[in-house]
């Protein structure tokens, strides 16, 4: 190897390491891998649609120096979605590249090359016009060749998620990269729950999924999926409180359709019966929640079991706010398998005069769950659980002294 070539290689290495260090400072949390055998089969299968994105600086002689990496997932055989920050080169990164490669900072964008790793081979990629939204932190990449052998993910609206539904993050963490190429050989899956949906004050038109499925640098742009293997978010960032943030599929679907990009959507795990919407909370445990209700519901009967997509699920919970401010609701029956009633589940149901708890499983009654119901409401519970339920129906839940809690006769 000649001196000039050795110097060039050394420059390349310094640039690679400098930028990788910069990225690692941004994402420093440890990732925890879970064995695919302990997950729903649909989640494990979803991994084949998630690919690594590599952004490189291509020198005039064709040499590519990897600068930063991320993840993305296929929505059709020739389109990969990711976060816009995965392909954007920041001003600070440009300064490092310019200094280490001795190039003009203003020409760096002209030399940036995006590739997507398909196993041991790579596929060229370019940003699709109209799909890039920096405020949302989302974009779609057009692949130079279709990856027909790989699975594509259906997009399920994030807003369809039930409270505390299981979720799984799939991506290519940069800490696992081969140092000479920046390539990560295998994707990693972590598990958690989707805790809430939020709009940030500075960006009020875009919805994000806050969840507990751990990620680190390199996972950005990967897929946040539900237990059925449907995408429910695009992995974005680590929050200051230690939770994780994903771009909502609600916004992703709108952006893709506006750009004329085809994608498949899914709506799974729910059914509406008797004015109550039930949603699956755990496909493996076969449990569901009474998650929402009709605005005009008068007599609510929360079932013990429901049949969703041909399978039976025990109804073990009532989601928070599920019946909030249902002024026309006058009577309520809670199924025998319900163990948890979320906060403000029946808040503001001023006409609710009669509640019957069918079973002995109830162990948690959320804050304000019955606050604002009729002040002389009658609550009937199984005789064997009367003492225990007196500890649940307290002022914190909204129970008032004028109400009556008694055993079923």
Image (cartoon, helix red, strand yellow):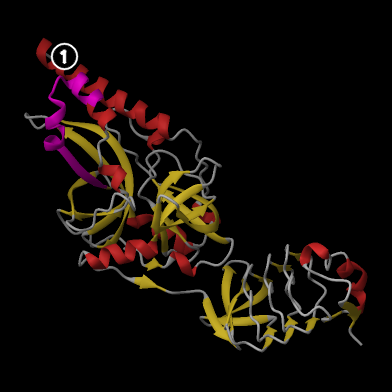
Can you give x and y, in whole percent of width and height, for residue 324 in the image? Answer: 63, 74
> In what quadrant of the picture does the N terminus appear?
top left
- Above or below, 162 against 9 in this view is below
Assess disc 1: are there few (<14), some (14-19) or many (≥20) residues with their C-alpha within 10 Å of its C-alpha: few
First to last magenta residue range: 95-117
In the foreground, 264 or 365: 365
> In what quadrant of the picture does the C terminus appear?
bottom right
- Whether residue 71 can be seen here: yes
Instruction: Write down the quadrant of residue 99 in the picture.
Output: top left
Q: Is residue 111 left or right of residue 91?
A: left
Can you give x and y, in whole percent of width and height, for residue 224 in the image? Answer: 43, 56
Instruction: Write down the quadrant of residue 181 in the picture.
Output: top left
In the foreground, 128 or 343: 343
- Above or below, 278 against 60 in this view is below
Can you give x and y, in whole percent of width and height, for residue 159 in the image? Answer: 46, 67
- Under tag 1, what secondary structure? helix
Q: Residue at x 51, y 36 (%)?
A: 30
- Whether residue 63 can be seen here: no
- Considering every residue shown, the one lying at the far top of the view is 3
Q: Residue at x 43, y 35 (%)?
A: 27
Which residue, given by chain and number where applicable, does mark 1 sit on?
7
Q: Residue at x 16, y 37 (%)?
A: 112
- Above or below, 334 against 87 in this view is below
Dominant secondary structure (helix, strand or loop) of the stretch shown in magenta = helix
Q: Is residue 287 left or right of residue 123?
A: right
Can you give x and y, in whole percent of width and height, for residue 246 in the image? Answer: 43, 53
Examine the structure image and report whether residue 114 is included in the region drawn in magenta.
Answer: yes
Q: Is residue 269 left or right of residue 77?
A: right
């Amino acid at each position: 190897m000649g001196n000039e070539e050795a110097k060039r290689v050394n420059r390349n290495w310094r640039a690679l390491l400098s930028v990788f260090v910069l990225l690692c400072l941004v994402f420093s949390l440890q990732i925890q891998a879970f064995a695919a055998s302990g997950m729903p089969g649909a989640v494990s299968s979803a991994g084949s649609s998630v690919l690594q994105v590599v952004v490189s600086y291509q020198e005039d002689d064709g040499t590519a120096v990897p600068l930063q990496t991320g993840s993305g997932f296929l929505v059709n055989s020739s389109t990969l979605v990711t976060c816009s920050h995965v392909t954007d080169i920041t001003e600070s990164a440009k300064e490092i590249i310019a200094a280490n490669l001795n190039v003009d900072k203003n020409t760096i964008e002209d030399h940036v090359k995006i590739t997507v790793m398909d196993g041991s081979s790579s596929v060229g990629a370019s940003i699709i016009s109209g799909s890039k939204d920096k405020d949302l932190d989302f974009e779609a990449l057009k692949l130079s060749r279709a990856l027909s052998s790989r699975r594509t993910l259906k997009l399920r609206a994030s807003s369809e998620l039930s409270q505390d539904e299981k979720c799984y993050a799939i991506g290519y963490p940069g800490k696992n990269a081969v140092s000479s190429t920046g390539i990560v050989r295998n994707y990693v899956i972590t598990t958690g729950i989707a805790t809430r949906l939020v709009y940030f004050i500075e960006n009020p038109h875009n919805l994000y999924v806050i969840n507990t499925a751990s990620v680190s640098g390199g996972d950005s742009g990967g897929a946040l999926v539900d237990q059925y293997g449907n995408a429910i978010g695009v992995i974005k960032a680590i929050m200051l409180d230690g939770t994780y943030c994903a771009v909502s599929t609600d916004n992703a679907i709108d952006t893709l359709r506006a750009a004329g990009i085809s994608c498949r959507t899914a709506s799974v795990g729910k059914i509406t019966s008797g004015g109550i919407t039930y949603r699956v909370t755990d496909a493996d445990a076969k449990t569901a929640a009474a998650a929402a209700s009709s605005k005009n519901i008068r007599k609510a009967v929360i079932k013990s079991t429901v049949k969703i997509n041909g399978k039976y699920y025990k109804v073990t919970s009532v989601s928070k706010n599920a019946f909030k401010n249902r002024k026309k609701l006058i009577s309520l029956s809670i199924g025998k398998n319900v163990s948890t009633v979320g906060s403000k589940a029946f808040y503001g149901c001023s006409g609710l005069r009669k509640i019957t708890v069918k079973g002995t499983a109830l162990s948690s009654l959320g804050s304000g769950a019955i606050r604002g119901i009729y002040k002389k409401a009658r609550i009937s519970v199984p005789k064997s659980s009367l003492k225990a339920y007196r500890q649940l129906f307290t002022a914190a839940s909204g129970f008032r002294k004028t109400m009556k809690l008694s055993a079923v006769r």
